[in-house]
Image: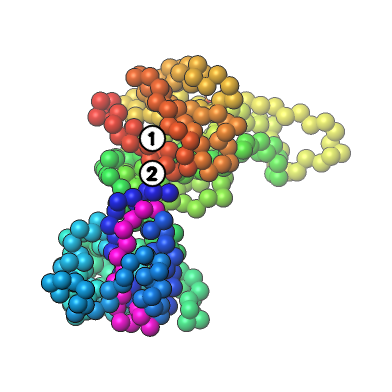
């Protein structure tokens, strides 16, 4: 993937066992096309070596204020200019205290003070150190100063204790960096997304569902959050982690999804219906498991509410986007569906080419016609869809 192509990231490491994860983070940045400059504190070098980080980032590492490789010997200025983002991972309690107080007695703290770019830190420390009022004060101060604090997570710690203070995983920090560096085309917008399958019980252990994995809807929620929107994801049952900075509401049935959406739609600027909603529910669902000995059970069905249709028909409806999975006649069915639902934009794909996969090919249908998005990972398509929505919004609202 090249989602960070051309981005210039400075990756700072301070002293902590989580420094081993910074190697993976550097690899993720480099693989996605970023230019990565690593700077390490003296303590960080006690955990991983500059040689390791040089090999993974593809560039010599800086550790010292007085490094003669910088022509004017002002490493803290030179290295902090032209950077799109500075990420300090791991950020020790000591380093956070220094940042919060504007101390600058080594290369990394000095360049953070001298920076013009956004700064994100990923704390990594023992649970008691994280919970200490001094660290909490420093974290609050850093937030007030506009520094993004990524994590920490809770769990087993290298010291043998358990609790808050574990550094986020490299992939999570990477995702945060992508979000920080994304154009904020939906800044200030409230976006509501439905995703995944619905499940309609037949009895207490059986039900009617479909093959939707939720991947496309989750990717759309992630892309909208990256674009600066405040995102709520109403999700059927999936096995997927919630994207960063997304509020998730879990539902099971179509009627629950309908109610969760309707309760929020007034506070919504953009509604994107990606969920594969069951068209029917079982009217005579049993409260106990149906026994084989019960003979041939009859399943009686009644239609579910059309969530997208209801939202689009509402008074002062948000900008509505639908999805259509067809198995044939994509174009004709998709345009029909868009007009039928009365929505400005519909994304269509062939079900057999999309369900459960990490990639997809989409065609967007709007008043201007059709826009083909070539096969790509779902997150890439989701970003293209979000950009398309953002371009349509000023005209639509
Ligand atoms: N949708 C919804 N509520 C439903 C059914 C569908 O919100 N009860 C949304 C889906 O999330 C998707 C779009 O409507 O955005 C799909 O349209 P729909 O006409 O329901 O698609 P299909 O059920 O696939 O229609 P058909 O079986 O006629 O192809």
Relative vertical location of residue 235 with respect to residue 147 in this rendering, above or below: above
Q: Nearer the viewer, residue 31 or 156?
A: 31
- Residue 45 colored in magenta in the image: yes
Q: Position of residue 102 (x, y in %)?
A: 17, 74
| Residue 295, horizontal then vertical, whole percent | 85, 33
Would you say 1 lies left or right of 185 here? right
Q: Where is residue 20, by image quadrant?
A: bottom left
Q: What residue is rendered at 50% in x and 16% in y?
A: 332
- Asked whether 275 falls inside the magenta stretch, the response is no
Q: Residue at x 30, y 82 (%)?
A: 42
**83 on left or right of 16:** left
List x then y, in percent, for residue 309: 45, 24
Q: Position of residue 82 (x, y in %)?
A: 20, 58
> Please, what secondary structure does the residue beneath circle 1 have?
helix
Quadrant position of residue 66: bottom left
Task: Tell me, yes or no, whether the two marked residues, 2 and 1, touch with CB atoms within 8 Å.
Answer: yes
> Is residue 266 visible to us here?
no
Residue annotated with mark 1: 385
- As drawn, is 5 to the left or to the right of 339? left
Tag shown at residue 223? 2
Query: What residue span does the magenta drawing correspond to?
Result: 32-46
- Could you tell me which residue is drawn at 38 percent across and 58 percent down? 30
Q: Which residue is at 17% across, 66% downward? A: 78
Q: Quadrant of residue 223?
A: top left
């Amino acid at each position: 993937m090249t989602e960070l192509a051309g981005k210039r990231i400075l990756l700072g490491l301070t002293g902590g066992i989580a420094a081993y994860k910074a190697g993976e983070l550097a690899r993720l940045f480099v693989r996605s096309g970023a230019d990565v400059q690593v700077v390490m504190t003296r303590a960080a070098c006690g955990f991983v070596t500059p040689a390791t980080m040089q090999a993974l980032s593809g560039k010599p590492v800086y550790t010292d204020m007085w490094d003669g490789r910088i022509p004017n010997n002002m490493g803290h200025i030179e290295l902090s200019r032209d950077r799109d983002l500075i990420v300090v991972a791991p950020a020790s309690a000591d380093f956070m205290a220094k940042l919060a107080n504007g101390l600058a007695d080594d290369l990394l703290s000095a360049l953070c003070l001298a920076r013009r770019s956004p700064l994100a830190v990923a704390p990594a420390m023992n649970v008691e150190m994280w919970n200490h009022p001094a660290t909490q004060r420093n974290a609050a101060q850093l937030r007030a100063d506009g520094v993004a604090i990524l994590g920490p997570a809770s769990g087993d710690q290298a010291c043998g204790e358990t609790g808050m203070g574990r550094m986020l995983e490299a992939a999570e920090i990477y995702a945060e960096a992508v979000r920080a560096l994304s154009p904020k085309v939906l800044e200030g917008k409230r976006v509501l997304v439905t995703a995944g399958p619905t499940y309609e019980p037949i009895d207490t252990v059986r039900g009617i569902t479909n093959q939707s994995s939720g991947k496309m809807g989750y990717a759309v929620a992630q892309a909208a959050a990256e674009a600066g929107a405040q995102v709520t994801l109403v999700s059927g049952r999936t096995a997927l982690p919630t994207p960063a900075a997304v509020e998730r509401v879990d539902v099971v049935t179509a009627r629950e999804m309908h109610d969760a959406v309707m309760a929020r739609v007034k506070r919504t600027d953009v509604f994107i219906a990606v969920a594969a909603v069951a068209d029917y529910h079982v009217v005579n669902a049993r409260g106990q498991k149906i026994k084989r000995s019960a003979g041939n059970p009859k399943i009686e069905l009644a239609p579910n509410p059309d969530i997208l249709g209801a939202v689009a028909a509402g008074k002062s409806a948000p900008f509505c986007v639908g999805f259509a999975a067809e198995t044939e006649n994509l174009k004709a069915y998709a345009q029909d569906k868009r007009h039928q639902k009365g929505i400005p934009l519909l994304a269509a794909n062939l079900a057999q080419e999309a369900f459960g996969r990490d990639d997809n090919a989409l065609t967007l249908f709007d008043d201007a016609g059709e826009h083909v998005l070539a096969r790509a990972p779902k997150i890439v398509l989701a970003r293209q869809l979000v950009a398309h929505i953002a371009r349509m919004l000023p005209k639509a609202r």
